[in-house]
Amino acid sequence: MRLVLLRHGQTEANVRRALDTVPPGSPLNELGLTQAASIAEVLADWPVRAVYASLATRAQQTAAPVAAAHGLEVTVVEGVHEVFVGELEGRSDRAARTAFDEVYDAWWAGDLERRLPGGESAHDVRARYLPAVERIVKQHDRPDAGAVVLVSHGAAIRLAAAALLGDTAGTQYVPNTGRVVLGLDPASPTGWALQLWDSGPELRGDVTAGGSPEA
């Protein structure tokens, strides 16, 4: 079985570099809809058996064409939404972004207990995200399971993927419609192996490629 962690397409909040983390959040903009159609084409030949999405509108809109390409429905799941930024919600000013970056950088330096002001820590995110992944895997862990797509959010995907890989693999920014593909691997200490960490399809137009916010 392969788990495809797919970030949603672009939103106007992304364009404004605003922290948009509370569902349902911003919908996809015109480019985001194009990105969703493009990634559906990329995955059209994959043996996709199920498509899941977070509570956010943008995630469900991205998942819809992927599911349609395989004659599937999108299953909405709790626990895989973006990192909750608390007091920084909706802000795009320099002070808010600096506050976010300081905590985000601390997580990658190993301080997973560091908390966003009024928001979550990295441990909080993993505590809700990883059980959701476990439930999905239990439903599809069989020889013919193929690939399962979970449409989620940049920072949450990065944190979850790092945990599933045992915090031993180098991680990087996940752009709009970028994929992190993990395969079940009994030989791995965590049971997962990294198969692909890509930068998404062409025409991504991701104006946040320089860094946060990843929501």
Image (spheres, helix red, strand yellow):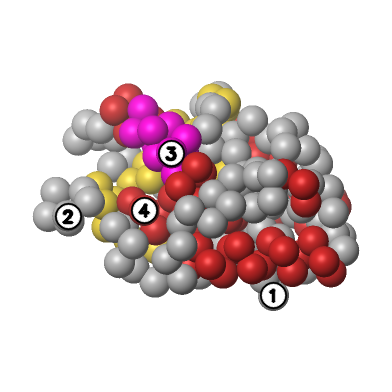
Does residue 21 sit above or below 209 in this rendering?
Answer: above
The percent position of residue 202, horizontal first and vertical second, equals 65, 67
| Few, some or many residues within 10 Å of mark 4 (<14, 14–19, 20+) | some
Quadrant position of residue 136: top left
Which numbered dot is residue 163?
4
Identify residue type, mark 1.
Gly
Identify residue type, mark 4.
Ala
Q: Nearer the viewer, residue 73 or 5?
A: 5
Residue of label 2: 189
Quadrant position of residue 161: bottom left
The percent position of residue 64, horizontal first and vertical second, equals 64, 34
- Could you tell me how far apart the alpha carbons at marks 2 and 1 are, in whole angstroms? 33 Å
Dot 3 falls on a residue whose secondary structure is helix
Dot 1 falls on a residue whose secondary structure is loop
Which tag, 3 or 4, sits closer to the chain's start? 3
Dot 2 falls on a residue whose secondary structure is loop
Does residue 34 sit above or below 95 in this rendering?
Answer: above
Residue of label 1: 210
The percent position of residue 193, horizontal first and vertical second, equals 27, 57
